Image (cartoon, rainbow, N blue to C red):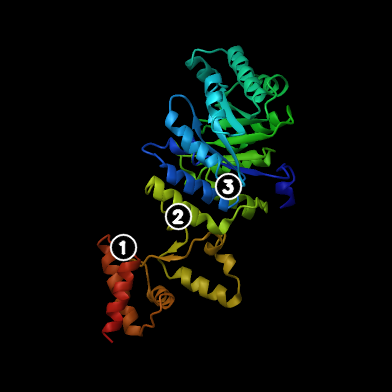
Amino acid sequence: MTDVTKDLAFPEKIQIEDWTLEGDGEDMPGMVFTRNEREEIARALDDIHVHRMNAGFITGLFPDDVEPTKAIVHLGLDAKVEVKVSVSKADIDLALTTDVSEILMELPSSDVWIESINQTRSKVIERSIEATTYAKEHGLRVTFGLQDATRADPEFVKQYTSALDTQAHADAICLADSWAVASPEGFRHLVEMVKSLTKLPISIHCHNDFGLATANALAGLSAGASIVTTTVNGIGERCGLSSLEEVVLGLRMLYNIDTGIRYDRFCDLSKIVERATGHVTSDLKPVVGKRAFAWETDDFPQLLTNLQAKRHVKAVMPYEPDSVGNDFRYFPGRKTGELGVRWEAERLGFKLTDQQVQDVVLQSRELSKAKRQPNREDFLTILAKATRKA
């Protein structure tokens, strides 16, 4: 393991900055959080000890967002609360009315994006310096983001970083894989490059269009980034962002880095957010998905029973479900046998005879063949009928 990790440069302290309430979370198509939902999510994030959260995008285009964001700022949370602001003095002034102490601003760093907004490299840097200077003169801590940094000319990224550090005096720099085009190796290289140029904290922001948001986030942190943006359940525009629960658990289980986040409340937090978003989280979602610890065949209960007897339960899974507030789930189906039925029945408080076990197996398989896999309620009904016959 030492040979594998010797070149990793994780910082001593990693901060999780959740963006569920910011535009990238709420920008998911069809998504609107009510004020009560926003406050409930903010409190839930604080309860699991998230270090930072972005409470919203403050702009004159959406004035209705100001008061709900201000309410979150005044909840008395332990987490640091920031807001996202466009590069505009008017919007910075508007952000000040929320009483927030930290903001994030961003502009494109890739030529294709810079040209698409009719700007030039020099103009982008000029606007960044002007806006950051103005915000800091008004007492705000500023993180400045390089949009599309993974498609930018490395020489321009170096120039931009230097300007934000020595001329704008930003408090942190955010490197964004805005279009999810980076590989973990490429993203790690980018962070290492920027890290060598500045002592400013580096924040990373990864999208998930190739399913690599978590991998890229871990790669960026291993290169020295100290802040990572996440969303609960990985929600966000397009394919979403780095998932809070995946990044935090990945750090703990794969790299032995404890961020101080409460893992055991992940499923509760996931449910709170999903009540607001509707059912958009895949049942196969790692950590919090309904099928994250699901099984149908007899192999699993047989293995688990053997390991329980030897007190080696952890050998059968990457982490135990109760450590993240999840649970084993049994899905009786075509491949379920007598051992699986008996095992789950006993978990539910039913003692079955051999004949009853065979009856339940048969009924479960028949439903499954009709492509109607029995859910928990169906299975309980089958068990009740089987035991009434005795």
Ranked by sequence position, the earlier of labels 3 and 2 is 3
Q: Position of residue 186 (x, y in %)?
A: 61, 33
Residue 328 has which mark?
A: none
Q: Amino acid at mark 1?
A: Gln
Vertical order, 275 against 360 (above or below): above
Quarter holding the C terminus is bottom left
Q: Quadrant of residue 342?
A: bottom left
Kindly identify which residue carries mark 3: 247
Q: Position of residue 24 (x, y in %)?
A: 48, 35
Report x, y in % for residue 346: 42, 78
| Residue furthest out toward the bottom | 390
Residue plotted at (33% across, 70% down): 379
Per the rendering, the mark at residue 373 is 1
N-terminal-most mark, 3 or 1: 3
Question: Could you tell which of marks 1 and 2 lies nearer the N-terminus?
Answer: 2
Q: Mark 2 highlights which residue? A: 289
Q: Nearer the viewer, residue 170 or 320?
A: 170
Left or right of 217, for residue 199: right
Dot 1: element: loop
Q: Is residue 285 visible?
A: no
Res 101 visible: yes
Pointer 3 with pointer 2, Cβ within 8 A: no
Q: Identify which amino acid the numbered label 2 is placed on.
A: Gly
